[in-house]
Structures are given as structure tokens and as C-alpha cells.
Amino acid sequence: MSDVEYYPEEGMEGEESPSSGLPERKPKFDKWMAISWGISLASAGLILALATVIVLFVKHEEEEAPGFELAVDMQLDEEEIEKKVKQKKLEKSSSSASSRSPIVAMTDLSDIDVSDMNFTVGLDKGVADVGVTGTVGNMGLGLDIGAMNMASFFGMKAKGNRFAFLIDYSASMKADQLKVMKRELIKTLATFNSNVQVSLIFFSGPSFIAGTDPKKAATNWDSPGRDAHNFRPKKGWKPPVPKWLACTKSTKSRLQKHIMETPVSFGTDWRNPFNMAYTMNPRPQVIFFMTDGSTRNPHETVEKVKKNRTIQVNSIAFGIPNEQAEAPMKEMAKATKGTFKSYSKQQITKMAAK
């Protein structure tokens, strides 16, 4: 028999096939088509998988690039930091080999009219706080002005840049005492430059800032029974807080006028000038306290001074009649590492004659 299979032509449906009695066989054409499609699908899947792998690989490579650049930048930064550290070490070594010179700031205000301005300079541990207040506004400045200035009053020396002078203007101060005291105070102020600040607090029974009329000041104080040693501020009134004044030429001239023209007044109470000095801001570094009279309540002042022992007190007993009256002044100076000096009336008379 021949291997050629017979397929009936169209239009011969009614004729019976000679092999109709045998089982029907699948055409070979369908089998090969399925195999072809399977191979095609497998190839497409393989290509897709390869494309995915390639894309992921390329993307991974692209993401790795910034990390490499960052690592390079970090390496450069570390090299730069190392260079700076070496430079700092060299500078430190160079500076330690040479001595350190303090910076001295000089402020010459001698040609400026400061009558309407208030200068406040604070100096602690070599650092000054300078404040200027007045009609021109406010200004703050920090300066390293190096070593502190030296003050000499009645031969007593003290270092600082803020000096408060508590000076007795009581009626018991006689002509020779006033003459010598005024000369010494003016001479001391003349040695100061504008880096030094002072405050002059005068007292008798009441206490008042230099330049204040003592009679007007007395109206704000009470003294029960006209007790010369017991003056207190009237109820509802507080003594003014003294201001710091830079020692410019115009300021020293004005203070000299107050020193020369202030009259004496009634009473002697040590408490009030110290109370005023301790309210100042910044506080004094050094207090010069001069009086010719004892007071009935010196222990109150001594205790206050001891509570403020960081502020040096230098005491001048100027014609006090006996050592017992001088004892509290010695105690104040000793407690604050200050100096005490005593002048008899005979010594004062000789000083005035010169």
C-alpha cells in the first residue's frame, strides 16, 4: 500500500471514504505546530529573563557610583581635617614659645562732653564690661584691658577699676580736716584715666551722692529725737543707686567742684553710705571709707562689710579721738584684706600747714 493519505475534496461529502471503517488518526500537522509554539514561548521567556538580569545589573552598577563618589569625598575631607589639625598644632606650638601680651584698650573721651551721659565700666578677672547710657541710647562692650589700675588715697594703695569713696561731710569735720581731705581726694582723682570709674558718696547722718545739696537730701531722712547716729530713709522713699563715672577730664572737673563746694551737715551714721555702695551694679571692687567721728552702732556696719568681704574696704580714721572708736574700722579693713590708717588732729594740722 502507498503511505500517501487521502483527503476527500470539498463537495464530496456524500461519498463514503474507503477507510471509513478504520480508527481516525490525528494529523501530524497539529503536533508540530504545538512543538513550534512551545519552543517559541520558551525562547521568549529566556530572552525576557536575560533582559531582566541585564537591567538589574546595570541599575545596580548605576547605584553603586554615588557610594564610590561619597567615599572619595570622605577621604578628601579626612585629609583636609588632618591638614588643619597639623596646622593648629603648629600654631599652638608657636604661640606657646612666645610670651602672651595682654590687650590694653584705651578709651580717650577727654574731648567729649559727657555731662548728659553715664558711663559704667565693670572689671572682673581682667575683663571689663563697659556700658554707656544717656540721651544717645545704650551700648554694651566687653574689653580685655589687662592689668588693673592703681589707686592711692592718703598713702593707701589698692588695685582695681571701680573705686567708691565714702567721705565724711559731718559738722565735726573742721577746717583743717576738710582742707586736707579735699586736697587728697582731688589728687587721687587726678591720677585716674578714663578706664577708671569712681563714685563719690558723701555722708553725715544722711547719705547722698556728690553734687546733691545736703539740706535737700536731709528732707528724705528721719532721725527720731534728732539722734545724730540714727538716720533712716523716710517711709516710701529709697536712696538712689549711685552711678559709676568714668574719669574723663570733664567728669573730674565736675567732681572737683562738688568736693570743694559741698557743705557739712548734721549727724554721723556709717550704715547709710555702705548701704548705698552695696546697691551699685556692678559692685565696687574697692571702697575707701574716711570719717572723723565714731558712731553708736558700728557693729551693724562691720557685719554688713563682713557679708560683702569680697569688696575691699580701706579705712581712714581722720581725727577720731581714741583707739576704741577706731577698732571697728580696723576690723572692717582686716576682714576684707584692706588697709587701716589713723591720723591724729595734730598730724592733720601739720598736713594742712604744708
Image: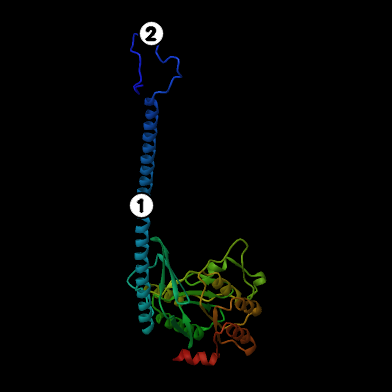
Q: Judge from the rendering whether residue 189 lies leftward or rightward of residue 204; answer left or right.
A: left
Tell me which residue sits at (56%, 66%) in the image: 239
Visible residue check, residue 106: no
Q: Secondary structure at mark 1?
A: helix
Q: Nearer the viewer, residue 58 or 284?
A: 58
Q: Nearer the viewer, residue 273 or 262?
A: 273
Q: CA distance from mark 1 to mark 2?
A: 72 Å
Q: Is residue 157 above or below residue 44?
A: below
For this orientation, the residue located farthest to the front is 1
Visible residue check, residue 179: yes
Q: Judge from the rendering whether residue 236 lies leftward or rightward of residue 81; answer left or right.
A: right
Q: Position of residue 259 (x, y in %)?
A: 46, 77
Q: Secondary structure at mark 2?
A: loop
* Quarter of the view holding residue 116: bottom left
Query: Neighbour class for label 2 at 10 Å: few (<14), some, many (≥20)?
Result: few
Circle 2 residue:
15
Q: Amino acid at mark 1?
A: Glu
Circle 1 residue:
61
